[in-house]
Amino acid sequence: MSVASLTLVHAKYSLVETLRVPIAVIGTVVFPALALLFFVVPQSAVAGDETYATQAVASMAVFSVMVGSLFSFGLGVAENREKPWDPYLRTLPAPGIARVLAHILATGAMSLLALVPLVVIGALLTEATATPLQLLAGLLAIIVAALPFMLIGICIGYAFSTKAAIAVIQIVFFTLAFGGGLFLPPLLFPDWLDAISQALPSRQGRDFVIWAVQGGDLQPLSWLGLVGWIVVLLGLALLLFRRDEGRRFR
Amino acid sequence: MNAPLDDTLARLSHVTRRFGDVTALDDVSLDIRPGSIVGLLGPNGAGKSTMLSLLQGLRRPTSGTVELFGGSPQNPRNRLRLGSTPQATALPDTLRVGEVVDFVGAHFAHPVPVGEMLDEFGLAELARKQTGALSGGQKRRLSVALAFVGRPELVLLDEPTTGLDVDGRRALWEAIRRQHDAGATVVITSHYLEEIEALAERVVVVAGGRVLEDDSLHNVLARVSLRQVTLGTPEPSRVAALPGVVRHTVAASGATTFYAGDSDALIIELVRSGIPFHDLAVRGATLEEAFLTLTEPRLEHA
């Protein structure tokens, strides 16, 4: 069986499992929309300016994909390792890469669903604008920007138990959200914070998506950084997957 | 490394596996050849499940080597001809019975069609049910069915009938035997001697992480079949020291039960020795009791 067909089978059944618990779907879709309503829409200085509003919606989109990826991967993987179904799947002849890719496909599909209300709210309640072509470019950029977060989630899931994973995910997601300028625009950052910020995958992802939607300059560090994070994290995720033997005996 | 040119399906060579300071397997060597049903028999915690998890590639040995179809079980390619069962409680609640069979079958080149597999294990009417809605027995049957979906050459069944009633157990035994007749080599763990007796041709007795016996069912049964001699005596330790006594237990009533391979010889010795006794009774020991005799004394040293 090829890696591609096994990936699709695992992704399909992972999605089927998720979709049969409707409240999980609603949670994923509603959370980023609420964040946009509370953080951006009430600030008229941002919501009333076309450039800033569009950037804010793009930042929120990165934020929503980041939160979705970190939680669904970090918690999902950690939980699965503690359930006896997962060790069984590991006895089947599927290589590690197929299962990692399947996770990425399934959660990616759910995250894309969560972008729909964001775009609708952004268009109706703020001055944010984008042509259909710009939207498409933004969508493609967000898929790339999401990869490091998914991989961070996978690494956390394989490195920690469920309880520890929750704490680690929260620390990582706050650091990445604020440090990456997803809540406060990096324009307001002092130089030293801006320097750190540019090394974070959240900032790189934000800049990449804004560039895809609005055009303008893209610093080489942004896309080089993203590629670097993806390569390093993919290697780490595979390493942790191979090392994992289910929950450790104590 | 000696590459196996023979037809050995799986092999453990001097395998030791420790978890922290617990030694689950202690220098175990075992070959699984095609054709038979091998019973892995032993009390809970004996190391049976650890053996299977090594063969499935879920764990690595602390020392020694594990081979599956001539290679490492950690390589997915070497698991293409292997079938195993999930724990019955492990099935994903929201997936339907037919979907689970389809999911597992998708990993293999020539899976048994879903409908055929469900018919074989009496699950046909349940195909559209979510596994969370199945009874314990139905889950158990589905778990065992999953081991055979990929038309495997080697099947590992970990306590397949635990928790089933007598009818359910017999039905599942029948299904396992049919699959074996169709060409699958089966390794089955159990702590029920009855199950091993019903299915296995070769028996491996494991206790305390070591292999105590590895022989045909017939020979192992002959070795463990014992008689019990129950009597009252003021000097039980002298009786226990007589030749042929392998073990004894004291009942609350004060009567002592002695286990021996040949009860007639023991009684002749008893009478000759002049040890006073009363209320003598002789009967055959159950296999369960005989099995305890085999595993208990050596456990104390572990």
Image (spheres, coloured by chain):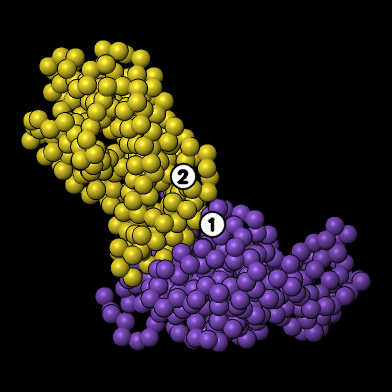
Chain colours: A yellow, B purple
How packed mark 2 is, by other alpha carbons closer than 10 Å (few <14, some 14-19, many 20 or more), is: some
Give the alpha-carbon distance from disc 1 to disc 2, as whole Å.
17 Å
User: Which chain is disc 2 placed on?
Assistant: A
Report x, y in % for residue A197. Answer: 18, 25
The residue at which mark 1 appears reads as B95
Residues marked 1 and 2 touching at CB (< 8 Å): no
Q: Residue at x 65, y 55 (%)?
A: B133
Indicate the quadrant containing the N terminus of chain A: top left, top right, bottom left or bottom right. bottom left
Disc marking residue A79: 2
Say left or right for A232 vs B285: left
Q: Nearer the viewer, residue B273 or B240?
A: B240
Instruction: Work out which residue is located at the far right of the displayed protein and give it.
Output: B279
Q: How many marks?
A: 2
Q: Is residue B85 above or below residue A64?
A: below
Instruction: Give the amino acid at mark 2.
Output: Glu
Q: Residue at x 23, y 17 (%)?
A: A49
Instruction: Give the amino acid at mark 1.
Output: Leu
Q: Residue at x 67, y 64 (%)?
A: B137
Q: Residue at x 28, y 33 (%)?
A: A62
Report x, y in % for residue A56. Answer: 26, 24
Report x, y in % for residue B194. Answer: 69, 75
Q: Nearer the viewer, residue B151 or B157?
A: B151
Residue A23 seen in this snapshot: yes
Image quarter of residue B284: bottom right
Say left or right for A211 vs A160: left
Q: Nearer the viewer, residue B77 or B208?
A: B77
